[in-house]
Amino acid sequence: MTSAPAPRRGRRPGAPDTRAAILAAAREGFAASGFGRTSVRSIAAAAGVDAALVHHYFGTKDDLFVASLDLRVDPREAVLPVVAGGPDGVGERLMRLFVSVWDDPDTRLPMLALLRGVGEPQSQQLLRDGFLRLVLQPVGDALGVDEPARRMSHVASQLLGLVVIRYLLEIEPLASLPAEQVVATYAPVLQGYLTGPLP
């Protein structure tokens, strides 16, 4: 007579494709409904897993959203040095970070893929939630500027315009302009949007 096997302790390992299934469900959910209307529970249901497993793999809903964007850098961490220096010089710090990220082919390619689909509602939703909600809005809030939503929408218009001309359409001479010149050109404009008087 053989004894029953001892019960296993600790977390039950997930199937090898569980993480990928959660990410796929998250991308689809966030793209279709946006961050605010997509719940961890709905993502778990679409992936066929328990909501606790989503938290186990990804932590918070914000963490899951960032993971679903498949970016090489976490934008929430990247902007910390930008706001740490306070309002003075923030335009230059933000511009320097932005250009360094977009000038790197490894980080640029997945973001360009998202931008190329900007005519689609799903891509527009991801861009609003990813770029504005996760990156720019926290910068305005952390700096304590007045009318942060208005100011950051101006900043977004400048940065997204630069992305389209320099990286997507590659229009010269801006496409080949050295990074330092791009920073020197745009930093004062961003500084004005962030801390200057609004009309």
Image (cartoon, rainbow, N blue to C red):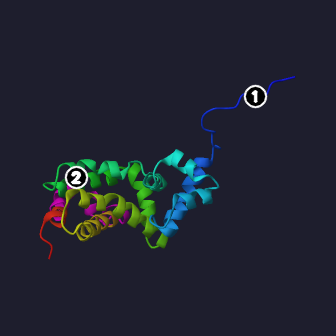
Q: What's the magenta region?
A: 165-189
Residue positioned most to the right: 1
Q: Residues within 10 Å of mark 1 (few under 14, many from 20)?
A: few
Q: Closer to the observer: label 2 or label 1? A: 1
The disc labelled 1 sits on which kind of residue? Answer: Pro
Residue 46 percent location from the top left of the image: 61, 60
Residue at the image position 51 percent from the left and 49 percent from the top: 55
Q: Is residue 62 above or below residue 12?
A: below
The image position of residue 52, as x and y in percent, is: 56, 49
Q: Is residue 86 left or right of residue 175?
A: left
Q: Quadrant of residue 182?
A: bottom left
Q: Amino acid at mark 2?
A: Val
For this rendering, which residue is in front, 27 or 104? Answer: 27
Nearest the eye: 197 or 60: 60
Q: Provide the residue designation for mark 2.
A: 83
Q: Residue at x 17, y 49 (%)?
A: 85
Name the quadrant of the C terminus.
bottom left
Q: Which labelled disc corresponds to residue 5?
A: 1
Eyeballing the image, is 87 above or below 152?
above
Q: Secondary structure at mark 1?
A: loop
**174 is within the stretch colored magenta:** yes
- Report the side of 166 relative to 125 (left or right): left
Q: Residues within 10 Å of mark 2 (few under 14, many from 20)?
A: some
Q: Which label is found at residue 44?
A: none
Residue drawn at x 70%, y 31% is 7
Q: Position of residue 50 (x, y in %)?
A: 61, 52
